[in-house]
Amino acid sequence: MEKLIIIVASAMTFLLAIGPAYGQYYSETVTPPPRREKMTRLHFFFHDILSGKNPGAVPIALPNITNAGLFLTLIAMDDPLTIGPELTSTNIGNAQGIYVWTARDPTMFSAVFYADFAFTSGRFNGSSFGLFSRYPETEIARASEQVIELAVVGGRGAFRMATGYALTRVTYASAENGDASLEFNVTLYHY
């Protein structure tokens, strides 16, 4: 009887293991033809606006501790991208995503940052790239003196399968209301 149970269990295990391999989702792995990698450099400005009647970034979760300030605040954003450093310059797209403010000191800024930078006009209309990176702790008053590197983790449209990096520099920051503008120099490698 024990032998019969072992044989039946072994047969069922074999059939269950082999079934998915020959099921409807099985496909053959092939070597793709060689592709030519492209490099694109982008320059634009990002405006993170937390204040006013129509903010582009809004806190959606706050810490459950008193006197935390912005520390551990989760912020959702839909911020404009422009050609020039002024918010009123030509809009070329928007950055949608989230970031968590990770600096305990209110005079510092640090965040874990995820955003999709989508272009809505010009040569790259309909294309985007994604950033997922840590923005290291930076003193707000001296932020314009530092260049920060963020990682590009993907893309779509003209930037399909993008990798690369974004070098950012703060052009405006307000410790009072949290508004900031950053200059972006992005290098993308894509197909």
Image (cartoon, rainbow, N blue to C red):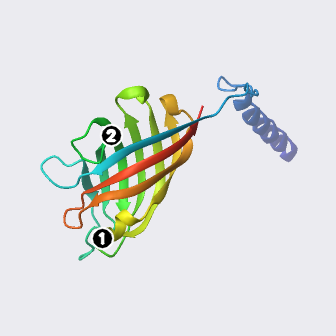
Toward the top, the furthest residue is 24
Q: CA distance from mark 1 to mark 2?
A: 24 Å
**Which is more toward the observer, 67 or 9?**
67
Residue 88 position in % (x across, y down): 21, 42
Residue placed under numbered mark 1 in the picture: 141
**Which is more toward the observer, 176 or 10?**
176
* Mark carried by residue 171: none
Which quadrant of the structure image shows residue 123? top left
Residue under the image location 47 percent in, 53 percent down: 167
Q: Quadrant of the C terminus?
A: top right
Residue 43 position in % (x across, y down): 42, 43
Mark 2 lies on a secondary structure that is: loop
How many other residues sit within 10 Å of disc 2, few (<14), some (14-19) or many (≥20)?
Answer: some
Mark 1–mark 2 CB contact (< 8 Å): no
* Mark carried by residue 83: 2
Residue 126 position in % (x across, y down): 40, 28
**Left or right: where does residue 16 sit relative to residue 147?**
right
- Badge 1 amino acid: Ala
Residue under the image location 33 percent in, 40 percent down: 83
- Badge 2 amino acid: Ile
